[in-house]
Structure formats: structure tokens, C-alpha cells
Image (cartoon, coloured by chain):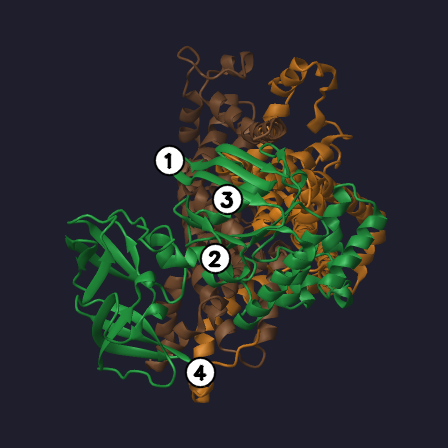
Amino acid sequence: MSNLSIAHLYKRYGAATVLDDINLGIETGEFVVLVGPSGCGKSTLLRMIAGLDGASGGDIHIAGKLVNNLAPAERGIAMVFQSYALYPHMNVRKNMTFGLKFTGVAPAEREKRVAEAARMLRLEELLERYPRDLSGGQRQRVAIGRAIVREPAVFLFDEPLSNLDAALRVSTRVEIANLHRLLKATIVYVTHDQVEAMTLADRIVVMNKGRIEQVGKPLDLYYAPANLFVAGFIGSPAMNFFGAKVESVEGRRARVTGAGFKSLDLPATPLGVGDTLTIGVRPEHLSRGTDGAFTVEGIVELVERLGESSFAHIRRADDKLFVAEVRGRDTPAVGDKTTLVAKAEDVHVFDASGLRIPMQGKS
Amino acid sequence: MTMEQRARSVGVHLVLLAYSALAIGPILLVVMNSFKARSAIFGAPLAPPDSSTFSLIGYDKVLRASNILTYYSNSLVVTLVSMALVLLFGAMAAWALTEYRFRGSTLLGLFLSIGIMVPIRLGSVAILNMMRTAGLNDTLTALILVYVAQGLPMSIFILSEFIQQIPRDLRDAARCDGVPETRIFLEVIAPLLRPAIATVAVFTIVPIWNDLWFPLILTSSDKTHTVTLGVQQFLGQYITDWNSVLAALSMAILPVVVIYVILSRQLIAGLTSGAVK
Amino acid sequence: MTEPVAHVVAQMPRGKRVGLLLLFLGPAVAIYSLFSIYPLLDTMALSTYTSDATGARHFVGLANFQALLGDALWSKPFWNAFGNNLIFFAVHMCVQNPIGIALAGFLSLPGLRLKGLYRTVMFLPTMLSVVIVGFSWNLILSPLWGVASGALKAVGLGSLFAPWLGLESSALITLSLISVWQFVGIPMMLIYAALLNIPDELIDAARVDGLGHFRIFLHIKLPLVLPTISLVSVLTFVANFNAFDLIYSVKGALAGPNFASDILGTFFYRTFFGNQLQLGNPTMGAAVATVMFFIILVGVCFYLFLVQRRIRRYAF
């Protein structure tokens, strides 16, 4: 049964449409991540779910209840904010129990919940301290604790890791994943970082310019992106794109050519002669060699060595750059002319409008 | 919005509207009635002037019987010159205090900030004596000197806050280039203080323009009176002549209101930005 | 934060450095010391003298203060003025500041339309000169014109009307309320600015926690702007005990009726400059000024050393 369902949600500010016909269903216990570039509407959507801003149209149901006209506190949600939003003039304990007082939770019950949350988040020592005496990571845990004690149907996270430094970000990410397992909570999590999305989510919702581009499990999005936007957004470094055209069809194979690559051999259906295509291949799917379904060559301009894997930036025939991952110590040198190949199943084909064309033999 | 939210919103607007009416009502009343004939002022005080009741008799009297135009020019001169000096000297002092830390700079800063709390009026006895001895009695210069002294502490305080926000790199880069200190101040720092000017202006211009005390004490002849003092004395003199009285009040109100409405955004931005400290 | 001395300046030859400091600090310090500090000190010194019929001055120590506080001739009007000033201050603290806080609270509600218009209109009276305000209200409240009595009659409260400004019992309160009417804008704007400083996310968190707008104001906003409120209070104190203009322009130097509206400012003016009832007495006037200075000093020190230390400022 859906714990959170959004139907035909719109949001307009004057003439600008910020959210356009959003439809989404989230199951109980699911960890769903809303991801996309700045301005795509993910935070706006989160605020609509929370009830902090009103929608221009559409319905939201939480735990089976229609919540359109309900105040945030009545919706069964709890929110963790990017800047933690802890009350500076209250200590940690008070921060966590403050809201409970106004929603009619008895003192004994309040104490129980705080103790439980403090144990889960290792905050027992900090209960009497004030936010100003806490580190960033500690404050974030208090903010999470404040959400936990509300025992909501849905947890909402608004870019909670953005304000933390890199190392803290990784450890807090792990903590959040653990919490999800422990509490079996339904979580809607907003981030602009696709690594966070990939590592935390049960399902990812990729958004762009107020619309949902694709919803799916992380690996589904990785291996079968629905369009150019998703393909270029998921995966780091980003997928390489090559402009192409179907030259001719000979029997069951099609000859596809493009200025940036050497050759590409694809099955004939569902392609037609003269079709304009975009070909996408991920850097990690390119390997040195001469024989493959897709071949590309060029001159190495820059090599980023990260240890076991390195990324070579290569200038190709149509003068654009593409990136290939190289593993091991034997990395190419700047100025080398090199040829790379990819297997047929690693080649993504997109039509003129940017939609993926599923190829034969692939799901 | 829910019904409840809409109701609350209406309630809020009602309160704000009511208070706004209270704030602006008396002013509108005075200005409106200044354009009416005497009988209409008493007969129907709340009615706006129409063709039968419209009259400029009050304004006529004010312009003939008093030197209101002289008063305006005096107020303008005093206010603008004082503000300019307060800004210039205040910025220089604020800069020196913030940038050139030296032994006793904190003490000096404290000394200067005493003036924010302590009212200068209490020294009027001595000020009057000083002005008399210096032969500056009954001059606009006396007023200017006093107002500058009064405005400096607050302006130094506000400008120091602004200067501290200017990135160090900017100041150091100029020094690396070997630019002399005075030029650094004039060409690098001063232009960056533009937002501060609005804040300082709010805290200096209004009290100076509206001040009654020092013009009362330091100026004796009609030709040095400021608008505030001039109008006050005119009112005292023509107290039963309602037309003239209302006209005089309106003439004192309208310029301030017009300038205020034009500059209100900057004024309020200045007040809200600097005043939070 | 302490910044290291600007190196270039620190390394300058001593003479050049002194010259620089004199140039930048000279004018400000000179004018301020000459026209603010020195007159104050001189006045305090003058208060220890008295002048006789020939105009010569004799040192009398604290005799003036003894007379002021104890001798019936001076102390009666002094304590009357002091008491009135306290009432004046109390009215401002109880009416002006709460209204200012409430209006600021309303203005800071998220999504309020016409905010700019309300702000501009409500701040307008503060821009006006006190003379205008005093006189306009004098006219409006005057029984001759009938505006105030007419307005009260219209809401059925006609019997409440009285010539408040002319009655001993109500003159001071009425003048205080007029002053409140004029200056509400200042606490309103200062507290509004402080409320704006509170991050939106904090308010969002409170809404998610289940607080309605009134509770948010009471439990979240108000505690966080307490430093500004206390600043407003001390500014009100200083302004009130320094007040003069309004009473003078409505009631003249005699602050009638029968000194009912006399406050320290008008008392000082009358003592020093004299009026139709008495000769000007500069030394006594200086004594009054000195006492006023110490009253204000006590208030400010109370604020600086007791209140400001205790109240926490929250940085966001």
C-alpha cells in the first residue's frame, strides 16, 4: 500500500510553472531520493509534501489520508533541514521535545522517545548542551533526533549533508542508511549529489525543470537511462555523447556514422535510414583495443590518476573531448594516439528527441 | 490556503490597516483642511475640500507673514552640511580606528561612543557660552558644529561595522601597490561605503531637520531660524488663525513626506540593515 | 576579532604615522570633544557655582544640588518633573514598545502582501517634526474643532470626550500617548529588522513541529529578539529623559496646566533661560542638567552592565 502518493501536482508562481504534473507513489519503508540540478523543483516538491508551501493543483495522500489542506504538523511528517534549524535558545533535549508538547504528547511519553532517539544517535551525553556548543555533525544528529521523536509516517530530508565537510558527509551518509534499516522508515530525501542518490536510495526520482525525468532503482537508472538527461546526470564522470546518423541498412545490421567516432555496428531494427541519433558510452565501459561494436580514437590531452583507476581526457576527431577510464598502472601518456572500444550492450542509443531506443538483445 | 489561514490573513490585515489609518489619519486631516475655507474647516472637518470650499487663504498668509522660504533654506543648509561633515569625518575616524590599531585606539573608540547614549543638550549652558564668546551666536555655523558633534558617535559606530565587512584583501592589495594611505581611503574605501550612507542618513538627517532645541537656544533672529523653529513660532503667534495654522503645518509636513515617500525604500533598508547590531 | 596592525602603517616612521592619525581622527575627535564632551564637563563644573546679583560667580560646592533635591523652592518642581518623567517613560514602555513589537510581529509574517506599503505608512509619523505632531494633535483634540469629539460620538463614546490636553489629570498621559503615536515606528522597525534576521528554516521547523503563528512568535521569535528589545528599552529611556520638544511646542515652557506636564527637559529649560515667572539661573540650570546626566547615566550603566551581559545574542 502506498504510504505517500502524489497525483497531478502542479505549482505555479505567476506565469512560471515550477512543478509540472508530478505523479509519484512511495511504498511504506521505501527510501526515495529526489535528485536533479539546481532549480529542478526537488526542494519545492519536498516543501509541498511537508505542507510548508501550498500546491496550485493536485492531491497528496499520506498514509491513506488526503493532506492537501492540512498543516504540516497534522500530516504525519517530520523534516530534517539543510541548516539543521535547531532552536538556538533551547538545549538538545528541549529541541527534541518542543514540538511534541504542542501535539499533545504526554511528558512521560516525551521522555521515553527522547531517550530512545538519543540512544540511537549517540546523543545521550549531549542532551543538556546548547546548539552553539555542538559540532556540525552533532547538530545534524540532533536535527535527525528531532524528526525521529515525532514518529512520523514519512521522513523528509532537505539536502542534509550539504553543510558538512567531505569526511563527515560520508560517515553521516552511512548513519542515515543504518537508521533507515533500523527504523524501517519511509524516507523522501532531496539532494543534488547523484552519488548520495545512488548509494542511499531504494528508488531514485530524477527531476529536471519541474518534471520527473525517470523513476527507478539506482542500477536501472545507470544501465537503462530513459533519456539523454538521465544518462548524463547519473554516473560520474558523466557519460560520453557522440552525434550520429544512420547511413544505411544492410540486412540485419545498420551502419551508423558520426564525426566523433570511428565505427559503430548496431542491429537494424528499430532504426531507419537517415535517423539522427545520439550515442552514449560511459567512460568505464571504454577499454583499449581495436575490435569492438563501437570504436573511437583520439589523442590524449589529460590524464587524471586517482590510483587504481585513472581518467583519460581524449580529443576526438570532431574536436570534442571524451573521457575513458583506465585501470592499473599502465596509463597512457599525454600526446598518445589511442583507440578504444566498447561492447554492444554498453552502447546507449538515443533518438533525435533524446529518448532512449532500446536495442535488440538489451532490456 | 485553508479557511483558517484565510481568516487569519484577513485579521492581520485589519489590524495593520487600522493602525495605518491611525498613523496617517491626523496628517491627512491637517493637510486636507489646510485647503478649505474657515467655515468649512469647522463645519465639516472630515470632508475633503471641494470646489466651493477650496481656499488657499491660509497659504497666502503664511507666505506673506513669515519667512518660511528662508526657514527652508536654513534647514536645508544646516542639514546637508552637517550630514556631509558627519559622513566625512565619521568615515575617516571609523577607518583610522578599525584599520590602524594603536595603543589607546580601543579607549578612543569607547570615548567616542559615549556620545551615542549621552545627550548633548545637557551641555547647552556651556555651548551657548562658547558660541557667544566665539561670536558664533545666532549663526547657522553654530548649529552645524553642534549637530556634527551630535551625529559623529552614531555614524562612527555604524561606519565601523561596515568597514569591518570590507574584505582585507582589498585593503592590502592597494598597499602592495604602494598607494598612499589617503588615496586608499578616498578611492578604495569611500566608494564601498555607499550602502552605509543610507543608514547614517536616517540616523542623522531626521533628528537634525526636526530639532527644536538648538535652533531655539542658539538662534535668536528670524533670518537664522530653521523650519521647525519658524513654524513653531508662527503657530504660537497666529494660534487663532486656523487657516494659516493649518497651512503652515502642511507646508512643514509636505516636503518631508514627499522626500520620505521617494526615498522610503532606501531609508528603511538603511535602518533595517545597520540597526540590527 | 582582533586584526593585526596594518603592517605598512606600523612600519611607517613615527612622525608620518602620527600625522596620518591626526589627519583621520583629528576633525572628528576635535569637534566631538569640543562641542559634546567639553560642554558637558563645563556644565557639571558650573553647577558647583552660584552667581549673585552682580553676576559674579562663587564656588559653592554641592549647595546647588542640596537645594535642588531638598529646598522646597527648587525641589518641589524638580521632583514633580522627575515624577512626571517617570510616568512619561512608563507610558512609552507599556504602550509604545508592546505595540511596536506586535506590529513588527505582524509585518514579519511570511507571505504578507502590501508589506512595504504598511511599513512606509506606519513609519511616517516618525519622520515628522515634533512641532507638527504636537500642534496637529492639539487641533484634533481641541474641543473647538470637534474632530475628536465627533469621532467618539460616532462610535457612541461621546461622553468620554474631555479637553484632555487642558486638564491637569490627563495632560501628561495625553502628551505621552501623542509621543507614542509619533515614535512607535522606531521600535517597530528595529524589532522588525531583528525578526528578519531569524532564518526561515527555523520558522519552518517550528511549523513542522506543530506551532501556530502566535506560538511561534511567543516561543521562538520573541526570545531571539530579546537583545533588540532591551536595546530599544534603553534607547527609549534615554530619549524620554531627554525629551523636551513635544511638551514645549504644545504647552510652552511652563508645561501647564499647572506644571502637570512638566518633565525634566522643560524644567531644565525654564530654570536656565527663565520665563515670565522667574529669572534665568544658569548655575541652577547647570545643576539640573548635571542631575539629568546622572539619571541617564544610571539607566545606561544598568543596561550595559546588568542587562546586556545577561541576555544572549544568537548569531545565525
Residue flagged by tag 2: what amino acid is it? Pro
Residue flagged by tag 3: what amino acid is it? Leu
Label 2 neighbour load within 10 Å: few <14, some 14-19, many 20+: many
Q: Which mark is residue A218?
A: 2
Residue flagged by tag 1: what amino acid is it? Ala
Q: Which mark is residue A45?
A: 3
Mark 2 secondary-structure assignment = helix
Check if mark 4 and mark 3 are on a common chain.
no
Q: Is residue C220 left or right of residue A329?
A: right
Q: Residue at x 71, y 48 (%)?
A: A151
Q: Is residue A284 left or right of residue B203?
A: left
Query: What residue would you read off at disc 4?
Result: C9
Query: Mark 2 or mark 4, which is nearer to you?
Result: 2
Give the CA separation, mark 2 to mark 4: 60 Å
What is the letter of the green chain?
A
Subunit ID for the residue under disc 4: C
Q: Is residue A282 left or right of residue B30?
A: left
In percent of width and height, residue C102 lies at 65, 39
Give the CA separation, mark 4 to mark 3: 55 Å
Give the CA separation, mark 3 to mark 2: 20 Å
- Colour seen for chain C: orange
Check if mark 1 and mark 2 are on a common chain.
yes
Query: What residue would you read off at disc 1?
Result: A15
